[in-house]
Image (cartoon, rainbow, N blue to C red):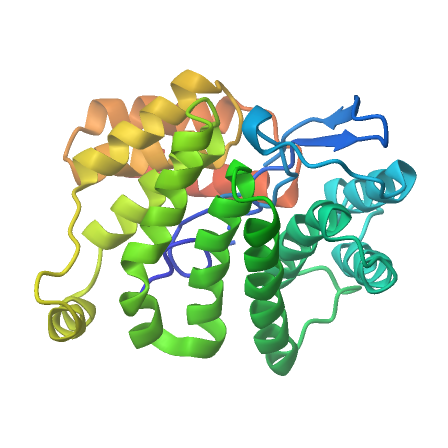
Amino acid sequence: MRTLIGRRLLGFGLKRNGILLRVSSRSYITSSSGSSSSRSKKGGLFLASATGMLLSTAGYVHCDVDASVLKECDDLFETRGKGGSLLRAYELLEKTYATNENAADRVELCYRLARAAYNLLSSTDPEDKVTGEMKKTLASKALEFAEEARKVAPNDFKSHYWCGIAIQAYGDHVGGTKYTLERLVDIRSSFEMAAQLNPRDGTTQYCLGAWCYSLSDLGWMSRKLASTLFATPPTSTFEEGLAFFLNAENVEPGFWNKNPLMIAKSYYKLDNREEAARWALETINRPCATPEDEQFKKEAEALYKRVN
């Protein structure tokens, strides 16, 4: 089965064709006084792609984790492959997590740990040296940390969409296709809850679009297996996925270079070559801030040649 969130499925930026992915990397870091102390620019998921955690007003969690440690981890993540390091970020977060017993503080650490673990799964940085067995551990850890974040902060929208992303990653590397198909509804429910908590977040809309696109693009064998697992298998369409991608661009213009690429691919699937070319060109013309962005640009260039 193609990956709903990334890796094999162009999905949640999760890159994985190259998640999303970091998914996104915007984050709010709260000091012990509860004030917003920093916000880093979102870069190229899904989910995906990786993401910082933006707490909804309803789900505010007081955090006493040293802001300088969080900033160092975010900087290592943002500059991965260009002086930074996913592995170093992950190891620093694990060390901080192991010495912190406060559940509220761990929320700030858990989503970052899930983000780092997820992105390490598709890392090509020689410094990361991720082996096949390590990927199984990382996928399990990503899900474990995401679920802990959601348990402690159920009103935080990013803890929900990270659960959706982590479920898919676990299916890719540990549980297998059957596991992923069995959790299709859980994955979408996680994204829908995130969208309900924050309808103005582009990444969440992207994740919903990727879920729809992936399901619409399933091969015959996967569809056959799904029919044995559900009385009525979940369905979607490329049109539904496109609507989410377009809405993502509407609520948060330019938030991630993968999104216009997915709009172009959706239009291509719908045989609208003119719009496919327009959005492919939009992807090509956007600045590339990460290695993932460069890959998206190459895909867009190939698609643009195909439709012209």
Q: Is residue 124 left or right of residue 56?
A: right
Give the vertical position of 170 relative to 236 (above or below): below
How many numbered discs sit on the rendered protein?
A: 0
Give the vertical position of 124 relative to 58 (above or below): below
Residue 166 spot, x, y in % from top left: 50, 59
Q: Residue furthest left?
A: 231
- Residue beneath the point at 40% across and 49% down: 11
Residue 287 spot, x, y in % from top left: 60, 25
Q: Is residue 23 left or right of residue 219?
A: right
- Residue beneath the point at 17% across and 69% down: 226
Is 38 in front, or is 243? Answer: 38
Q: Could one spot residue 250 in this view of the protein?
A: yes
Q: Could one spot residue 305 in this view of the protein?
A: no
Q: Quadrant of residue 232?
A: bottom left
Q: Quadrant of residue 101?
A: bottom right
- Residue beneath the point at 52% across and 44% down: 154
Q: Quadrant of the N terminus?
A: bottom left
Is 307 in front, or is 106? Answer: 106
Residue 253 spot, x, y in % from top left: 48, 18
Q: Is residue 188 left or right of residue 8?
A: left
Residue 133 spot, x, y in % from top left: 62, 82
Give the vertical position of 179 relative to 168 (above or below): below
Is 230 in front, or is 265? Answer: 230
Give the vertical position of 74 relative to 30 (above or below): below
Q: Quadrant of the C terminus?
A: top left
Q: Residue furthest bottom?
A: 133
